[in-house]
Amino acid sequence: LQLISEVRAGLERGEFELAFQAQYTPDGHVAALEALARWRHPLRGLLEPAHFIPVCEESGLIVDLGRYVLREALRERRRLVEAGRADVRIAVNVSAAQFTDDLHRDVLDALDGQPLPPGALELELTESVLMDRPGHAIELMRGLVELGITFSVDDFGTGYSSLAYLKRFPIKRLKIDRSFVQDLDADASDAAICQSIISLAHALDLGTVAEGVETEAQRAWLRDRGCDELQGYLWGRPQPLDALLPTLRRH
Ligand code: G
Ligand code: G
Ligand code: MN
Ligand code: NA
């Protein structure tokens, strides 16, 4: 209970910030930056989502945090554009409680009248968020697509999406859950799952992003099998945009 009021106060005091993790094409170009929330706690230091996302989900504060993250991610995108990298999309995680009719207005508010080039902002949804009310999800997503937003399915393979719906949702990409990527080299069934997800995605005209790529062997394997984008500690931990900008800058 105390943590809930601390998070609420932290949001009001501006203690939350974003770290970014890049998604690379197999030839090493940055295609996207995923925004990940961090809490600069006055006493406990920089906290990762495991320390505050669960309590935010339980209390409904995730909606307020989500609004903040959307606004902040778009603000940071403007700096990316100024650095000559309008081509890099920004990806933002969206949880179940945020994925309601209010999301459309939240996105419009965060845009603040600025147009959004199609594909500049991607929202990451999990299978369970999509499959909770699939018909409603499609409606909501269509409205957001009209604003220029794209969608990816986060942690793909861990939930239970219906393939019939996968075809109907306006999604652009599947993000292969890192649990399958982790043991790619050692576990034949994990390798088969990664291969199947890539094949399925391509058959449905979707892109793929492998999460949790940590080794050169995993990178090579995924590249050789046509995985479109790669993300993971192999290229570093999520970092503030300021730390990433020097390598991204293009004039
Ligand atoms: O940041 P880390 O690298 O520790 O992220 C852990 C988890 O927290 C991930 O599953 C990620 O999706 C989730 N997460 C991080 N930032 C956000 C956010 O802004 N909103 C939501 N809903 N989840 C987030
Ligand atoms: O998918 P989600 O939105 O849950 O993913 C973001 C989370 O994954 C963050 O906690 C991030 O720190 C973590 N992550 C990113 N790359 C790697 C990696 O290569 N290995 C592991 N173990 N975790 C990673
Ligand atoms: Mn994600
Ligand atoms: Na994920």
Image: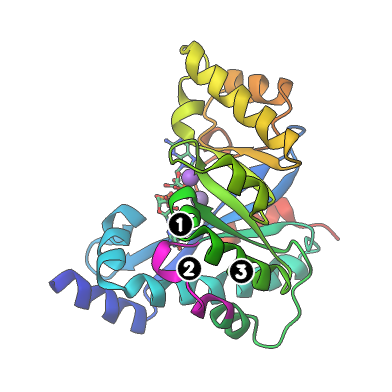
How far apart are the two marked residues, 2 and 3, measured between alpha carbons?
Answer: 11 Å
Quick one: SS at disc 2? loop
**Does residue 174 appear anywhere in the picture?**
yes
The amino acid type, in three-letter code, at marker 1 is Val
The amino acid type, in three-letter code, at marker 2 is Phe
Residue at the location (76% across, 68% down)?
81
Is the C-beta of the residue carrying label 2 under 8 Å from the nearest atom of ligand 1? no
Q: Read off the residue under disc 1.
A: 129
Q: Nearer the viewer, residue 240 or 65?
A: 65
Q: Read off the residue under disc 2.
A: 99
Disc nearer the start of the sequence (3/1): 1
Residue at the location (44% across, 30% down)?
179
Q: Read off the residue under disc 3.
A: 139
Disc nearer the start of the sequence (2/3): 2
Quick one: SS at disc 1? helix
Dot 2 alpha-carbon crowd within 10 angstroms: few under 14, some 14 to 19, many 20 or more: some
For this orientation, the residue located farthest to the left is 1
Contact, mark 2 vs mark 3 (Cβ under 8 Å):
no
Q: Nearer the viewer, residue 117 or 79?
A: 117
Quick one: SS at disc 3? helix
Dot 3 alpha-carbon crowd within 10 angstroms: few under 14, some 14 to 19, many 20 or more: few
The amino acid type, in three-letter code, at marker 3 is Glu
Residue 175, percent from left and from top: 58, 42
**Does residue 237 appear anywhere in the picture?**
no
Contact, mark 1 vs mark 2 (Cβ under 8 Å):
yes
Q: Is residue 6 left or right of residue 80?
A: left
Q: Which residues are magenta?
A: 94-104
Residue 96 against residue 182 in the figure, above or below: below
